[in-house]
Image (spheres, helix red, strand yellow):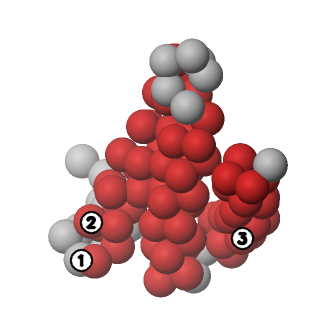
Amino acid sequence: MPNKLTPLYDITWYVKWVGTVFLILAVSSRSAGDNAIPHIYDLCFSLCGLGCWFFVAFKWHDRALMTVNAICLPLLLTGIIREIWI
């Protein structure tokens, strides 16, 4: 059995799973279509999920995860602002 490299049952373990659930909700709401679930839910779920994963990446010192999340977070915030005010 291979050794686990990621921490088990510390704060990052819980946050990464919460973030993963939010991202699954985001993709599910996106695939359901705008008629079934408003687009703002997809954006908000994605923002929460990416925020959780950015925290995990920061705690793990994982530059690749920090980069993708740091780029996507402001893009999602822009989408949420556009959805609310436009």
Taking the image as shown, residue 14 lies to the left or right of residue 81, namely left
Pinpoint residue 29: horizontal percent, then vertical percent: 49, 29
Query: Image point 57% across, 16% down: which residue?
Result: 35
Q: At numbered mark 1, what does the secondary structure look like: helix, strand or loop?
A: loop
- Disc 3, disc 1: CB below 8 Å? no
Between 43 and 21, the residue placed more toward the observer is 43
Q: CA distance from mark 2 to mark 3?
A: 20 Å
Query: Image point 44% across, 37% down: which residue?
Result: 24
What's the amino acid at mark 2?
Tyr
Query: Image point 55% across, 31% down: which residue?
Result: 38
Q: Nearer the viewer, mark 3 or mark 1?
A: 3
Considering only order in the chain, which callout, 1 or 3, is on the residue closer to the N terminus? 1
Q: CA distance from mark 1 to mark 2?
A: 7 Å
Which residue in the structure is indicated by mark 3? 70
Pinpoint residue 8: horizontal percent, then vertical percent: 23, 68
Considering only order in the chain, which callout, 3 or 2, is on the residue closer to the N terminus? 2
User: Image quadrant of residue 14?
Assistant: bottom left
Pinpoint residue 83: horizontal percent, then vertical percent: 71, 47
Residue farthest toward the front in the current orientation of the protein: 85
What's the amino acid at mark 3?
Ala
- In this figure, what is the number of numbered marks? 3
Which residue in the structure is indicated by mark 1? 10
Badge 1 density bin: few <14, some 14–19, many ≥20, Cα 10 Å: few
What's the amino acid at mark 1?
Asp
Which residue in the structure is indicated by mark 2? 14
Q: CA distance from mark 3 to mark 1?
A: 23 Å
- Disc 1, disc 2: CB below 8 Å? yes
Taking the image as shown, residue 72 lies to the left or right of residue 53, namely right
Badge 2 density bin: few <14, some 14–19, many ≥20, Cα 10 Å: some
**Position above or below: 11 against 82:** below
Q: Nearer the viewer, mark 1 or mark 2?
A: 2
